[in-house]
Image: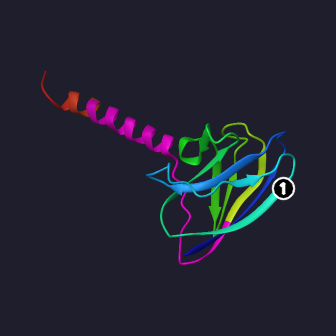
């Protein structure tokens, strides 16, 4: 098991909730962890090792996901820091998870960037193919 600790500060006027979900199944989310309006919060919880996506919501209907480019993040050692204000504009600061337990690795997966890279390689391949094949 992996033990996560979350700390977050909100400058918003409403409560927000966060959690994590397996990267390939965002419907299987952890219990919502509350970030109170205009306050700070910390909480600890356990998960099984795996690849996870982090979300933020205020109404449990609209979800903002790190994999969707709704936040900017970085990881160092056993901590991942996420800046929601730079992504979706929600003013949640000092938002970070730290973990301990089973050996793990935090990896930022910038899905939109990966799509740009794939798209540009397809374009380059098609240009090279057109130049090499006779007309």
Picture coordinates of residue 116 (x, y %)? 45, 38
Where residue 102 sits, quadrant-wise, is bottom right
Q: Position of residue 34 (x, y in %)?
A: 74, 53
Q: Of 33 and 11, which appears nearest the observer?
A: 33
User: Residue at position x 66%, y 54% from top?
Assistant: 32
Q: Is residue 90 magenta?
A: no
Q: Position of residue 9 (x, y in %)?
A: 81, 53
Residue 47 vertical placement versus 118 (above, below): below
Q: Does residue 89 lie above or below 9 as drawn? A: above
Q: Residue furthest top?
A: 135
Q: Is residue 24 left or right of residue 34?
A: left
Q: Is residue 75 above or below residue 10?
A: below
**Element at label 1:** strand
Quadrant containing the C terminus in the rendered view: top left
Q: Which residues are magenta?
A: 98-126
Rendered residue at 50%/54% (across/down): 28
Give neighbour class at mark 1: few <14, some 14-19, many 20+ (Cα, 10 Å): some
| Residue behind mark 1 | 40
Q: Residue at x 43, y 40 (%)?
A: 115
């Amino acid at each position: 098991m992996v033990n996560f600790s979350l700390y977050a500060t909100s400058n918003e006027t409403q409560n927000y909730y966060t959690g994590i979900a397996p990267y390939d199944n965002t419907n299987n989310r952890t219990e919502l962890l509350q970030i109170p309006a205009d306050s700070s919060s910390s909480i600890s919880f356990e998960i099984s090792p795996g690849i996870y996506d982090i979300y933020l919501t205020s109404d449990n209907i609209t979800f903002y996901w790190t994999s969707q480019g709704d936040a900017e993040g970085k990881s160092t050692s056993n901590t991942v820091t996420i800046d929601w204000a730079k992504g979706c504009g929600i003013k949640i600061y000092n938002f970070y998870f730290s973990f301990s337990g089973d050996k793990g690795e935090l990896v930022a997966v910038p899905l939109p960037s990966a799509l740009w890279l794939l798209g540009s390689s397809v374009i380059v391949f098609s240009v090279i193919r057109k130049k090499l094949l006779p007309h």
